[in-house]
Amino acid sequence: MMAAHNSTFAELPPPAAPPVPVAVVEEHPDVALVARAKAGDTSAFEQLVKQYDRQIFRTANHITQNREDAEDITQDVFFKAFQKLEQFKGDSKFSTWLVRIAVNESLMRLRKRKTSKTVSMDQDVETDEGSIPRDFAEWRPNPEQIYSQSELGDILRKTIGGLPPGFRTVFTLRDIENLSTEETAEALGLSVPAVKSRLLRARLQLRERLSRYFRQKTEATK
Amino acid sequence: MNCTDFLAKLTDFFDGNIESELMAEVSEHLGHCRHCEVVVDTTRHTIDIYRGNEIYEFPDELSQRLRSAVMARCEGVKPAPAQAEGAESVGAAGSLR
């Protein structure tokens, strides 16, 4: 058997190029922190809290549109993550895992607030608003120079707050938190085409609403 | 390609997720459709403006307060001991010597 193999190899032409060096895959620093936290090192877990508290607070605030809820959710997310740390197997990024918990907690909070009314990722997504652009005005060169930082903040909060939760959540994860389409789909339990469709409509609705504030007043310059 | 076809591809266009053949059609449409050009421009601005502005304040004081509260809650809950993870720990490897 071995001889046959050897003769086969002997007939092969020599390699055309020197062997390609094996790429060293760098381990994400969170992997070591999570391993230390699992082993009982609470300072490692505290470091993870420090790294991601802003992102989790922002995600919860975007979804719930309520600052106090976002504070409570941020605490709950990290506490749950600590309790369930053994369940984190590293198949996704640790931050994505946290975001997924944050989304669940935030949607639960919305459901509680609305008592009998169900809040889900499907709520209000049947709306046609934004699916067909209507405003074709160009924006002023830099809207950030027209409004003060606090005025701009008010406009952006009001505008995203007016989106249905299903759209707001997809836009938050994909465009603000920079998750990939696949990560967003995984975090929300949606298919990739469903994420793409909601993202398109969320972006178009936001664009349409912001246009009311940022459009060039061509008529005023005439 | 008309405006409806173009809009259907807008998400893939922003994500740079379009095959070269289709990209040529998209570019051609954008070259002569002023409305779609404005939609692309202002949608891009929309994304940028949300990415570039932290609209919910998160001062250091709040971060510290939340972190302290989380760590206080975690105090009472002991994570599973390292030995439960198996022979990967330093202690287990040391015992093999």
Image (cartoon, grey):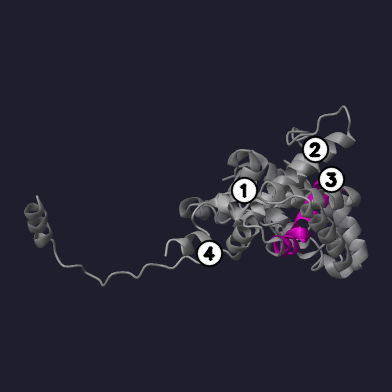
**Given the image, what chain letter belongs to the residue carrying mark 3?**
A
Q: Which mark is residue A86?
A: 1
Q: Earlier in the sequence, mark 1 or mark 3?
A: 3
Q: Within 10 angstroms of label 1, few (less than 14), some, or many (20 or more) residues?
A: some
* Residue A27 numbered tag: 4
In percent of the image, x 66 and y 55: which residue is there?
A95
Q: Nearer the viewer, mark 4 or mark 3?
A: 4
Query: In the picture shown, does residue A30 fall above or below A74?
Result: below
Alpha-carbon distance for marks 2 and 1?
Answer: 23 Å
Q: Chain of mark 1?
A: A
Element at badge 1? Answer: helix
Image depth: mark 1 or mark 3 in front = 1
Amino acid tagged 3 = Thr
What label does residue A108 carry, if any?
2
**Residue at the (75%, 40%) spot, across then down:** A166
Q: CA distance from mark 4 to mark 2?
A: 34 Å
Which numbered disc flags the more N-terminal residue, 2 or 1? 1
Q: What residue range appears in magenta?
A: A45-65
Marks 4 and 2 belong to one chain: yes
> In which quadrant of the rendered image does the C terminus of chain A lie?
bottom right
Question: Which mark sits nearer the N-terminus, 1 or 4?
Answer: 4
